[in-house]
Image: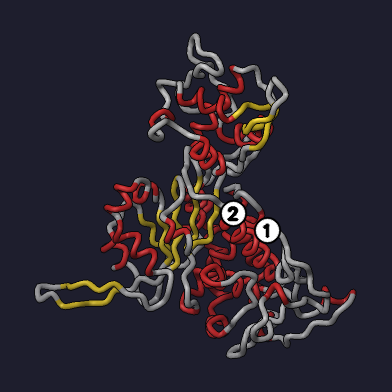
Amino acid sequence: MTESTASRPATAAPGPTAATTNWPPVAKAGEPGAYLPGLQPEASTACGQPEAAPAEPGALSGTDLLPDTEATEGADLLAQLKALIATFVILPSEEALDAATLWVAATHLQGSWQHAPRLAVVGPAKRCGKSRLLDVLTETVHQPVLTVNSTPAAVFRSITEEPPTLLVDEADTIFGSPKMAEKNEEMRGLLNAGHQRDRYVLRVVGNDHTPRRFHTFAMAAIAGIGDLPDTIMDRSIVIRMRRRAEGERVAPYRTMRDRPALHAIRDRIAQWSAPLAEQALLLEPAMPVEDRAADTWEPLVIIADLAGGPWPRLARQACRRMVDDEVQTEEDSPGGARILADIRRIFHAAGEPDSITTDQLLFTLNGDPEAPWAEAGRGGLNARGLGAMLREFGISSGNVRIGDGTQRKGYLRHKFTDAWRRYCPTVHPTAPGSEAGTGAGVGAGPRR
């Protein structure tokens, strides 16, 4: 095994040879982080380059544009794991795939972390690959504990001083409505507390009701339709899954056939990472984000720095971009694929115009007696509620020109095409006698 990036001197030379220098200057054990005290990551310079102007949200900062470092055995193992994950599931971006890969590797060094990042695997509708991703994670993480409809008591009794990795599927059955969330408040509290080390739950046990502390610290992957409670999302690396579009292919997953390969890479990552536990415990890496986001992403960045190669750069790029994406996400008001299918029918019934005004969409949606939109509020679905649902799919309103030449707020058809292709590729017929502007009929949910 080659020397890890964390043990090399923090040196970097300016100019054309910067790509071959040992950057980022990852902290040595027991020493401060890679940046000078009091200097924010965005304000520092990488490889002697001038300080850059403030970047737009989502733009790469100096910590994201680092040259590759010398690779260790871990870099190759991470690349193999990444390829295996991509074999069975399509993630929404390359950054999300990198994050999932690093998160898996980080589960094998949980004893070194101060914070146990959650992996929130969420999607706006069914069949987005959430459970398939959890299948792959189950076979590659450290000591998986799969929980479906488990009680909080059973879960925290499964967590020991040597933390397992919790895998919670169908989280929408736990937190999918205010009533469910209230009923499962103890589970939410457990998942929140377990994000940080030394947060215990106190329970009485035995006939003499002796107080006993139970561990909560453990990394957890949580999958479900729609966003999780805000307090969990805030402690999570969020992967927003999408349904596969026509033409996108993955290999079918078969447990008995595919498990050996996944277990093999799991065991090799565990073997590689085990001797690095003390080193990982003392590292303070340069982070492109701050506060709780930095706490959550730090284990992934440390794993990347220990592996070397392209991973220090990839980890910081994923961190910056995915955190910025979540910052830009509005309050969730998920409408699932139903709202997309209904709007597609409206465009179809209107003759596929380039745009439709917001008022026309709302009039048609609220006028359908078989649709839920008229009951979305006191006066039915409004522009704000429609905008919140469509933002889940990356669709926003804008100014559109109507027949008399004036401009009104509305939606351009081309902004829906990618979401329609993924969630409702087939236009279902409208109800008999219905017309655009008077209520497009709504049948069963979209089918492939």
Task: Give amino acid for label 2.
Answer: Gln
Residue 41 visible in the shown view:
yes
Task: Give amino acid for label 1.
Answer: Gly
- If you read the primary sequence from the N terminus, does the residue marked by circle 2 or circle 1 appear first? 1
Q: Where's residue 365, x and y in %?
A: 49, 25
* Quadrant of residue 145 within the rendered picture: bottom left
Dot 2: few (<14), some (14–19), or many (≥20) neighbours within 10 Å?
few
Depth check: 106 or 321 in front?
A: 321
Gap in Å between the C-alphas at discs 2 and 1? 9 Å
Q: Where's residue 191, x and y in %?
A: 38, 63
Task: Determine contact: label 2, label 1, CB under 8 Å.
Answer: yes
Residue 257 visible in the shown view:
no
Q: Which residue is mark 2?
A: 328
Determine whether the residue tagged by mark 2 lies in a helix, strand or loop: helix
Q: Where's residue 174, x and y in %?
A: 34, 50
Kindly identify the residue that appears in the image at 80 percent across and 82 percent down. 12
Kindly identify the residue that appears in the image at 65 percent across and 70 percent down. 288
User: Split into 4 quadrants, where in the image is the C terminus?
Assistant: top right
Kindly identify the residue that appears in the image at 48 percent across and 53 percent down. 134
Determine whether the residue tagged by mark 1 lies in a helix, strand or loop: loop
Q: Where's residue 187, x and y in %?
A: 32, 60
When the figure is inspected, residue 400 is found, relative to residue 121, above or below; the finding is above
User: Split into 4 quadrants, where in the image is the N terminus?
Assistant: bottom right
Q: Is residue 340 left or right of residue 226?
A: right
Dot 1: few (<14), some (14–19), or many (≥20) neighbours within 10 Å?
some
- Count the labels in the image: 2
When the figure is inspected, residue 138 is found, relative to residue 17, above or below; the finding is above
Q: Is residue 370 left or right of residue 409?
A: left
Kindly identify the residue that appears in the image at 65 percent across and 86 percent down. 37
User: Which numbered tag is attached to residue 58?
Assistant: 1
Farthest-out residue, bottom: 30
User: Which numbered tag is attached to residue 397?
Assistant: none
